[in-house]
Image: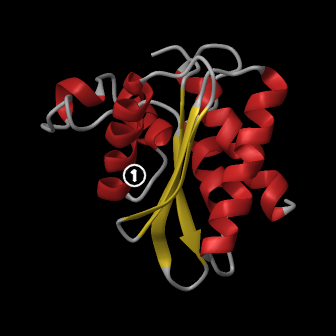
Amino acid sequence: MAQAQNTPSVADLEAQEQRLVFRTFTHDDAWALGSLLVELGWERRAPIAVDIHRAGQQLFHAALPGSTPDNDAWIARKRRVVERYGSASYLVGSRFRAKGTTFEDSSRLDPDRYAAHGGSFPITVEGVGVIGSVTVSGLPQIEDHRLVVEALERFLKV
């Protein structure tokens, strides 16, 4: 399967996950990271919704102008992929595409409950593992993914 220009490879996506790791992740961190994503969304006039979950609890949620209830449904579906696979929703979808198939055709999971589309990224804590997710919905999937990665890079200063 040919890779589209500017589309990150599976290796690139895996490297992002290895690099974007927290020492700790608190309620204050969720507020600061979520607020950063909202600020980026406002600057770009992006019609996004933002969600941060940790250990099954929603710590942050915001919906910017132009977002809809559908964005919340997409957030839940993408977040479930991170919770199940422990990897970014875009990476999970990319792994299926790299095998010449799709998540929808091969995962055996209900597409009404799971979406391996870009925008949900695992919150990983050093020495602990994946404890939650940060998710954006409202842009094309690669742009949702890139926005989350950009915010994580700024927040973690990497």
Colouring convention used in this rendered image of the protein: secondary structure
| Residue 58 place in picture, x, y as percent | 44, 60
| Residue 108 place in picture, x, y as percent | 12, 37
The residue lying at 47 percent from left, 69 percent from top is 130
- Quick one: SS at disc 1? helix
| Residue 123 place in picture, x, y as percent | 55, 63
Asked whether, in this view, residue 59 is left or right of residue 16, the answer is left
Q: Residue furthest front?
A: 65
From the viewer's side, name the closer residue of 16 and 66: 66
Q: Residue furthest bottom?
A: 127
> Looking at the picture, does residue 21 appear above or below residue 89?
below
Q: Amino acid at mark 1?
A: Val
The residue lying at 48 percent from left, 75 percent from top is 129
The residue lying at 64 percent from left, 31 percent from top is 8
From the viewer's side, name the closer residue of 4 and 147: 147
In this orientation, does residue 137 appear? yes
From the viewer's side, name the closer residue of 99 and 79: 79
Query: Which residue is labeled 1 in the image?
Result: 82
> Looking at the picture, does residue 123 appear above or below residue 12?
below
| Residue 139 place in picture, x, y as percent | 59, 20
Asked whether, in this view, residue 114 is left or right of residue 97, the answer is left
The residue lying at 76 percent from left, 20 percent from top is 45
From the viewer's side, name the closer residue of 5 and 36: 36
Quadrant into which the C terminus falls = bottom right
* Total numbered circles: 1
> Looking at the picture, does residue 77 appear above or below residue 138?
below
Quadrant into which the N terminus falls = top left
Circle 1 packing at 10 Å, graded few (<14), some (14-19), many (20+), is many
In this orientation, does residue 116 appear? no
